[in-house]
Image: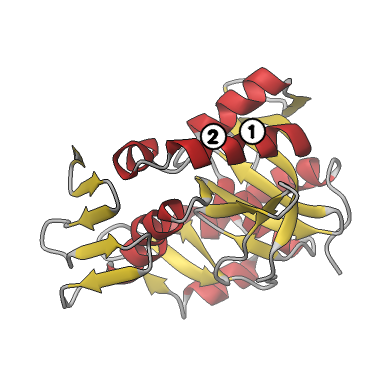
Amino acid sequence: MDQHGYWQTADGAFLINPDGGPRWLVSEKGRLVRVAPAEDGDVGVHLLDSVLAACLQMRGVLVLHASAIATAAGAVLFMGPVGIGKSSLVAALTDRGYPLLADGIVAIARDCNGNPLALGGFPRIRLWARSIDALDKTWRRRKAVSAARAGVGSYAVPAGRFNGNTVAVHAVYALSGTVDREVVIESLPPGPAFTALVRHSFRMRFLRGLGEEKNHFHTVSAVARRATIQRLVRPHVGHPPAVLAARAAERLPPACP
């Protein structure tokens, strides 16, 4: 068994029990989910992140800490640590015509030929209030009717464009920050590409406790071999989401029709 903070894993089971929140138990290869009733504003947050990730990982699906859009060439993912700007970048790209595919976590399965496929998520983007203020004014109007995560200040904002289909993975960008003023986009060779995908896998300790590391590494290898993996280094200041989206769009295929 592996225990970390408010969650525990064992072979074939996952328990999440946040202080004062609902208790979730996931078992039977992610096909059985039980929750103790609770009036908690974060129920949906736990369901769409930790619980959903555990269900998918139990079924051998790779889960990346990323957000994704759909393009004419396939899914493009932006992965990175919390606060690096994945969601706000994807939100700004939807303003440029790219449909949202998933936000927060992106699930990747393999088809019968081993090709990585990104699974459609939910038609909402979780954004901090300051990120919404930095986006087009339409996002501020959507914020007014969006659910806020209690005590945190982030909002589940409806996406203006959404594609909920399963889409072949075309490219993955690993986001990081810099004190410089220029955006840098560069290709990653296979070794660093594999390492970046592992680093941004959703809660690796889930996998160790669940006994699913083998399936995880097989899918990571498939993504590293068959998709374009790049590093996108963004300035910490001076590049609002729309500016960064314009820079990223220079490298992107056309939007998915």
Q: Position of residue 169 (x, y in %)?
A: 73, 49
Residue at 16%, 57% (x, y): give it.
17
Quick check: can you spot residue 250? yes
Q: Is residue 252 above or below residue 166?
A: above
Which amino acid lies under the numbered mark 1 shown in the image of this protein?
Answer: Ser
Q: Circle 2 sits on which residue? A: 217
**Is the C-beta separation of discs 2 and 1 under 8 Å?**
yes
- Please name the amino acid that badge 2 sits on: Phe
In the image, residue 40 sits, relative to residue 247, either above or below, namely below
Give 254 or 24, whichever is nearer the viewer.
Answer: 24
Q: Which is more toward the observer, 80 or 210?
A: 210
Who's the residue at 66% across and 26% down the image?
193
Q: Position of residue 139 (x, y in %)?
A: 59, 68
- Horizontal and vertical percent position of residue 28: 32, 63
The residue where tag 1 is placed is 221
Identify which residue, 63 or 147, lies in the foreground: 63
**In the image, is residue 187 above or below residue 109?**
above
Quarter residue 187 falls in = top right
**Percent x, y of residue 24:** 23, 64
Secondary structure found at label 2 = helix
Give the quadrant of the N terminus. Answer: top left
Left or right of residue 187, residue 1 in this image: left
Which quarter of the figure is the C terminus placed in? bottom right
Q: Is residue 238 visible?
A: no
Left or right relative to 32: residue 19:
left
Q: Residues within 10 Å of mark 2 (few under 14, many from 20)?
A: some
